């Protein structure tokens, strides 16, 4: 939908008791009197939409900056400074770090409302750079004695799978694309097409926010369907194959390939025990039997039904692929898939 100002915009009237046939006093176009006071000047530039936008993003209205920086803090640390991101009213508890919230909001406005600078302040802070490991019982999350361990959401997880396999397309902008059907697109997940009337089951499985309403935060669940998708999805298997192919170019020795897999997926070298386990696994004779993922594809649905049926009102077809033979994964490809399915890959430490 596109909007343009009318040639001669007019003020609206209050409808008494909501009845359009009973008009009340005329209401001038201006900023909210509850925030700007009763003496707020009326808007005179066309419809007033541009003036309204400037009034919302104004230093005289710090609420906008406080709400925004609170949400960005929540995205970075998992828990916002104000636990009710969509409600800064008098009924909500005051933030424990209200001075920090005020400083972030003031700095955000002073730096020209630069989102990039805001991210830099957060990412360069010692709080963000702390490790998530702790040897003592952690206090409440909001105290931030260590970085809170967080699981990647669906968009970040899919992008991470593409990145480690070398298939991520970083081209900015463009039209939305189908990210669930083969041939699988390498576009970032933010460009994935969302059908609000028929949201695919995989999006619901990974707690995608409801696209029909404003969502201040996401619910995080851990359900078997998530593991089923990562084990059986042709998209994940395709990334595992590409990752293994890249590791195979590092040298004929299995140790080099295992190190390459660990460095690309987990950003660290394998521990001596992990290296020995990996070498022993790769040394086993390669069998042409179906891979674990293919076995799941030949098997049944979650409750014993044939794969691809609708169970409990949800389509399993995008979690367990339809029955058809799949090529076996080589040991190196299986090891790559194991690392992609690991908690260490799916969590931010």
Image (spheres, helix red, strand yellow):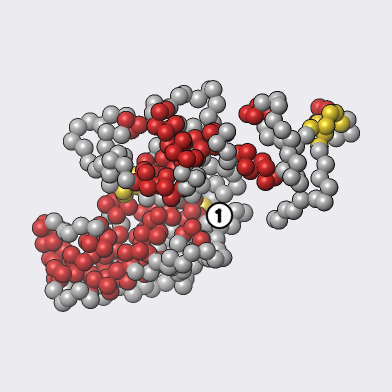
What residue do we see at 52% from left, 52% from top?
Answer: 314
Residue 61 higher or lower than 162, as above or below = above
In the rendering, at what x and y percent does residue 343 appear? Answer: 28, 51
Q: Nearer the viewer, residue 87 or 334?
A: 87
Quadrant housing residue 241: bottom left
Which residue is denoted by mark 1 in the rendering?
199
Side (left or right) of 281 relative to 85 = left
Give above or below for 5 relative to 249: above
Is any part of residue 297 visible from this angle? no
Percent from the top left, x then y, of residue 70?
A: 46, 37
Coordinates of residue 313 in the picture (x, y in percent) = 54, 50
Q: In this rendering, does residue 110 appear at all?
A: yes
In the rendered view of the protein, which quadrant contains the N terminus? Answer: bottom right
Q: Secondary structure at mark 1?
A: loop
Q: Is residue 53 left or right of residue 178?
A: right
Quadrant in the picture for residue 44 = top right
Residue located at (74% from left, 45% from top) = 45
Horizontal side, residue 107 vs residue 283: left or right: right
Residue 71, x across and y down, in percent:
47, 40
Q: Residues within 10 Å of mark 1 (few under 14, many from 20)?
A: some
Looking at the image, which residue is at 32% across and 30% down?
143
- Furthest residue in direction right, as rendered: 21
């Amino acid at each position: 939908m596109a909007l343009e100002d009318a040639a001669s915009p007019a003020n609206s009237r209050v409808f008494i008791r909501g009845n359009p046939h009973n008009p009340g006093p005329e209401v001038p176009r201006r900023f909210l009197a509850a925030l700007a006071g009763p003496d707020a000047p009326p808007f005179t530039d066309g419809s007033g939409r541009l003036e309204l936008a400037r009034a919302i993003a104004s230093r005289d209205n710090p609420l906008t900056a406080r709400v925004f920086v609170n949400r960005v803090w929540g995205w970075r640390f998992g828990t916002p400074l104000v636990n009710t991101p969509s409600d800064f009213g008098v009924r909500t508890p005051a933030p424990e770090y209200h001075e920090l919230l005020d400083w972030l909001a003031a700095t955000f406005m002073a730096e020209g409302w630069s989102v990039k600078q805001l991210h830099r302040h957060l990412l360069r802070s010692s709080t963000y750079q702390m490790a998530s490991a702790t040897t003592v019982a952690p206090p409440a999350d909001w105290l931030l004695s260590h970085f809170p361990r967080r699981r990647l959401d669906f968009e970040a997880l899919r992008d991470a799978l593409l990145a480690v396999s070398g298939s991520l397309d970083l081209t900015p902008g463009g039209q939305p694309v189908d990210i669930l059907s083969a041939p699988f697109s390498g576009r970032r997940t933010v460009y994935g097409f969302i059908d609000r009337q028929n949201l695919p089951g995989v999006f619901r499985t990974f707690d995608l926010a409801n696209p029909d309403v404003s969502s201040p935060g996401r619910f995080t669940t851990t359900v078997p369907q998530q593991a089923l998708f990562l084990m059986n999805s042709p998209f994940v298997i395709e990334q595992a194959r590409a990752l293994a192919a890249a590791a195979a170019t590092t040298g004929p020795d299995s140790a080099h390939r295992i190190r390459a897999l660990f460095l690309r997926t987990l950003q660290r070298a394998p521990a001596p025990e992990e290296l020995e386990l990996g070498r022993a696994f790769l040394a086993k004779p390669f069998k042409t039997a179906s891979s674990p993922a293919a076995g799941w594809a030949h098997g049944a649905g979650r409750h014993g039904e044939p794969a691809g049926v609708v169970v409990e009102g949800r389509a399993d077809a995008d979690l367990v692929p339809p029955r058809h033979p799949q090529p076996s994964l080589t040991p190196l490809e299986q090891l790559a898939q194991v690392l992609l399915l690991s908690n260490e890959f799916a969590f931010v430490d």
